[in-house]
Every structure is written in structure tokens, then in C-alpha cells.
Image (cartoon, rainbow, N blue to C red):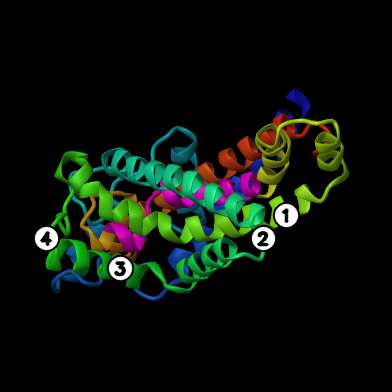
Amino acid sequence: MLDLLLRRLLVGIPTLLVIITVAFFMIRLAPGGPFDKERAVTPEVERNLLKAYDLDQPLLTQYGRYLTGVLQGDFGPSYKYHDFTVGELLRAGFPASVKLGSLALLLAIVIGVSLGAMGALYQNTGRDYAVMTLAMTGITIPTFVMAPLLTLIFGIYLAWLPVAGWGEGGWRHLLLPVVALALPQIAYIARLTRGSMIEVLNANYIRTARAKGLAERIVIGRHALKGALLPVVSYLGPTTANLVTGSVVIETIFGIPGIGRYFVQSALNRDYTMVMGTVVVYAVLILLLNLLVDLLYNLLDPKVQQR
């Protein structure tokens, strides 16, 4: 286990460096700049703005300074959110994104695994067809359609829930965005669980367990479900990072002050440092969660060889 941890860390560090490098140069090679939308200023004022943010330096010099700052935990100042650093903005938006994403992930795992297991246990019956119909519906309807639809039904027509805002993270404000964010993941997890569960139920060790007279609930809960969760665990690595860092669409539609909304606004405003800070946070989460997935693989099935 320790060897696996060290190997993944040794691979993760250069991977993170490559991501930072590619993102840094790509965003600066894009047309325009962070001050193009400002009101017309004199050349002298423009030179002072560029100098204040070190944008008058050669690109490699800017890269070296940014990389040095990142290693020290400093993502630099925001070009558009004046008087705030990128770190301060990320710390302000991260709790909302984490709460929203964590609840959506928990909901997706509980419902998705339950539906997938039910579909596998009642294969080719009405229950199985109903589960697959719901799964395909969740996959095919995009979030930017489902979220306004839920808002229209439960927020406007029925007036049960607020349609936007954070409300200090209360359950009434969280319910619609969490459900909208979780629905596609419920569909994917249900399909993965069903397919894996069907394969495991036909395995020799399951037949042996049944032949020994074990109760069906023990066969399913202790043996079949454990093996069926391996593909789901693998899928949850990048999915968790995506949900925790916040959905761009969901946070924008529901007006949630999370990282996703900052990322959209910063990309439109060409706020280089804010975009880079979000990319770095997302990349770190991806790497850490993939590492966690590898460790969980070993716990669920020690026979799995990690290379």
C-alpha cells in the first residue's frame, strides 16, 4: 500500500506541472487580454496596469514567477476582483462548492447503486426496464435543461422551493441544485452498477456461496455487491472532483457563490490568475481522488494488482 502511494505521488507531481504549464500558456495565447474591456485609457495608464501585474515581462519570466508563487501557495491577485487575491476568492467559494458537490455525490451513490442493484437482481423484468429507462433519461437530458425544468415546476408552478440564492446553505435552497447536479450521476452509476452486478452474479464464487447455503441477503450484500462496486469506485474519482469543485451550469443557474461561477466569470473577463487558480485546484483534486480510488481498489479487492 505504501509503495502504491509513493508511486502515485511520483507520477502526480510531474502531471500537475504539465497541467499548470499547458494551462498557463494556452490562456495567454488566446486573443485579447485582461484589460481589453476596460474603458479607453492612455498608453501610459495601460503600461502602468501591465507593469503592476507583471504582464509587461517576457512570457517565460511570467511563467517562472507564477510557478514560484504556486509552490508557495500564492496564486497571485485577481485582475478583475480588485482588492482580492485568487486564494481569498477560492477560499470564499470552495465551501459552497464542497457542500453542494458532496451532497450531490452522496445522493448519486445511494440512489444510483440501489437502482443498479435492483435492475441486476430483477434482470429483464419490468423493474429492470424501469431502471434503465430512468438511467437513459438522466443521461440524455443535459443539466442545463433539467435545472430550469426543476426550477419551473417546484419553484414557480408549485412554489415549494426557492429558485435561486444560497440562503446560508439551508436545505430549501440546496434541494433543487443538489438534485439537478446528482441526476446525471445517478444515471451513470445505476448503469455501471447494473452491468457489473449482472457479471458478478454469474461468477463462480457467487454460485459457490449459494451452494453452501448462505442467505441471499448475505450473498448479495457481502459478496456480490462488493465486487460490483469496483467499476463504480473507478468512476467516482474524476466525478467527485467535478462535483466538489462545483458545476458551472448549476452554480450559474441557481446563483450559488461557488468556484464554478467564479471560473465562468473569470474566463469571460480573461482573469488569468483566477482561471489558473481554479485549474490548479481542480487538477489537485483529480489527482488526489484518483489516488484514493486506487487505494479503495486494494481495500475492496486485494487481488487487484496496481501497476
State the residue position of label 4. 159
Badge 2 density bin: few <14, some 14–19, many ≥20, Cα 10 Å? some
Q: Which mark is residue 198?
A: 1
Give the structural element (helix, strand or loop) at label 2. loop
Q: Is residue 155 left or right of residue 280?
A: left
Give the structural element (helix, strand or loop) at label 1. helix
Seen from the viewer's position, the closer of residues 305 and 41 is 305
Image quarter where the N terminus lies is: top right
Q: Nearer the viewer, mark 4 or mark 1?
A: 1
Q: Nearer the viewer, mark 3 or mark 4?
A: 4
- Whichever of callouts 4 and 1 sits on the residue coming sooner in the sequence is 4
Which residue type carries mark 4?
Answer: Ala
Separation of disc 1 and disc 2 at Cα? 8 Å
Q: Is residue 232 left or right of residue 63?
A: right
Which residue type carries mark 1?
Answer: Ile
Which residue type carries mark 2?
Answer: Gln
Separation of disc 2 and disc 4 at Cα? 39 Å
- Whichever of callouts 1 and 2 sits on the residue coming sooner in the sequence is 2
Q: Which mark is residue 268?
A: 3
Badge 4 density bin: few <14, some 14–19, many ≥20, Cα 10 Å? few
Q: Which mark is residue 123?
A: 2
x and y, in percent, of residue 225 in the image: 67, 41
- Whichever of callouts 3 and 4 sits on the residue coming sooner in the sequence is 4
- Whichever of callouts 1 and 3 sits on the residue coming sooner in the sequence is 1
- Whichever of callouts 2 and 4 sits on the residue coming sooner in the sequence is 2
